[in-house]
Amino acid sequence: MVDSVLRKPSSRLSKSVVAISALTIAVLVTGFVLWPKSPTNLAQEDAQARAELLQQWNAGEIAVLIRHAERCDRSSNPCLGPADGITRVGSEAAAVVGRGLAHLGLSQTDILTSPVTRTVQTAHYMFNSDPRTQEWLVTCGTPLRNDVVAHKVAHRNLVLVTHSGCIADFEQQTGLKHAAKDAEYGSSLFVHIDGNGQLQVLGIVNAEDWNTLQQEKD
């Protein structure tokens, strides 16, 4: 009888522990599923999603954050010049991205770049010109989201050539708290910004995926 009485609290405690553990696991699994991990790859989206992106681009409602091309100081490929610049391979990839953006249309697009050598060179090979440099595209940090919105002119798209750390900052500030830390070289993060400054991250286009997006426009 004594043994039976002693076992009952222990049994109830064990059941409570099991129940709490099960609930904790369920919460963690649900959170893992619901937490945004990384932006959608727009090249893998269906035709309707890409058509909507093109409509928004034509309406001048898009901002694009682009990581510079391959760094010279982190590659064995030949450099274009200074060690803090990009490689020749990087310049060719930058030209591909530039042609993709030109295919979308740049007549109503403002282009800004970080003043660092690798971003300036990337922008040059993208657009065959040297866009305006902006210090806030290298310092980034917590003001970045608001800086992007502030520089977005109504009915004009905004292209920003920047750094992986800055793109990571922006993703954190827009709810993608579990996105990959480093964007690929030349990758483009597309963001929709409406007339009230409300924004939505649409997804990314990697440098090698521009042909897919161009085919949709054609």
Image (cartoon, rainbow, N blue to C red):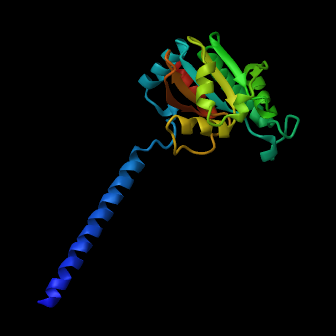
Camera-side residue of 122 and 37:
37
Residue 76 place in picture, x, y as percent: 81, 47
**165 horizontally vs 40: left or right:** right
Tell how many labels: 0
Q: Is residue 88 above or below residue 22?
A: above
Q: Residue at x 68, y 23 (%)?
A: 98
Q: Which quadrant is the N terminus positioned in?
A: bottom left
Q: Nearer the viewer, residue 158 or 211?
A: 158
Q: In the image, is residue 191 above or below residue 58?
A: below
Residue at figure coordinates x 76%, y 19% from the top left: 132
Q: In which quarter of the view is residue 161 placed? A: top right
Q: Is residue 123 above or below residue 13?
A: above
Image location (x, y in percent) of residue 108: 62, 10
Residue 93 seen from this side: no
Q: Which residue occupies the extreme left position in the image?
A: 1
Q: Does residue 77 appear anywhere in the picture?
A: yes
Left or right side of 69 for 59: left
Q: Is residue 161 left or right of residue 193?
A: right
Looking at the picture, tell me which residue is in the foreground, 119 or 2: 2
Residue most toward the bottom?
2
Where is residue 120? Give x, y as percent: 78, 28
